[in-house]
Image (cartoon, rainbow, N blue to C red):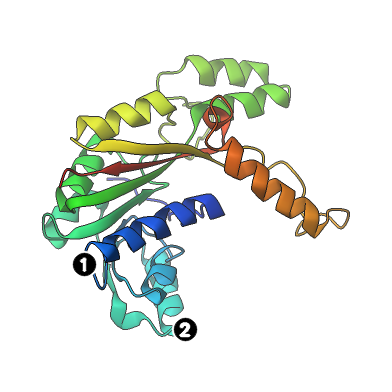
Amino acid sequence: MRAETSAGHGSAAVRKVLHDELRAARERGAGEPSVVDVGGGSGVWAVPFASAGCRVTVVEPNPNARATLERRAAEDGVSDRITVVADDSDALAAHVPEGSAHLVLVHSLLEVVDDPDAVLDAATRVTAPGGAVSALTANRHAAVLHRALTGRLGEAHRLLVDPDGVLSHDSETVLRRFDTDTLTRMLTDTGLAVELIRGDCVVAEIVPTAADSPGASVDREHELAEFEAVASATPPLRDIASRLHALARKAG
């Protein structure tokens, strides 16, 4: 199986969805919600969740990513709350008991693994009844639009018509990209009920902010955040975001 990339950062909107999910798990009686981060990389999700009182299992094959994760966990004093598994995502069921996780993260992973359906099936099996799977994926329509707007119309056309939404002969770093219909179908095919599907970064990656432009103001950043919060849930803007975020529930 090919090496898996580390999980990417999500927007404040993605983080809010996940924190709301964990709060709901606590309301259902989970004092220390169990989170599984499949292909969790260097711990950008795992360490904050552990700091918030969760028990986190990270399945990650890359030794450099694991080393960074372990260093971050030690710096934040949460090493005892994170279990690190050195294995590929297709070995998930061998390390996590079936029906044990309140929340399973499958972030920036489905686009790079050999068999995304198998990953989602394994993630569903380890999710507890009433728990949820969070999937964050690259959006094919965003890739098409970006290339078209920068004048690379030939590449845009090839991405649009390619079944997997990739430029297979141009050293692409992903094996596939998704659209909302495909992501929804894949999740429902595992028996999950999709409760939410939103965009992540509709324009945030192309609009200058105070962090990367001296001319941008803090007010501009606030306006951008407010715009993203609405646009990410509004088709068709949702459908051209850089990434798609879905939350799907396992029947209780």
Q: Earlier in the sequence, mark 1 or mark 2?
A: 1
- Corner quadrant of residue 85: bottom left
Q: Is residue 96 above or below residue 249?
A: below
Residue 65 in the figure: left or right of residue 38: right
Q: Where residue 193 sits: x, y (%)?
A: 25, 36
- Looking at the rendered structure, the kind of residue marked 2 is Glu
**Mark on residue 75?**
2
- Residue visible at 82% across and 54% down in the picture: 213
Q: Residues within 10 Å of mark 2 (few under 14, many from 20)?
A: few
**Mark on residue 48?**
none
Viewer-nearest of labels 1 and 2? Answer: 1
Q: Nearer the viewer, residue 52 or 93?
A: 52
- Residue visible at 30% across and 27% down in the picture: 185
- Residue visible at 34% across and 38% down in the picture: 195
Q: Is residue 87 above or below residue 237?
A: below
- The secondary structure type at the circle numbered 2 is helix
- Looking at the rendered structure, the kind of residue marked 1 is Gly
Mark 1, residue position: 29
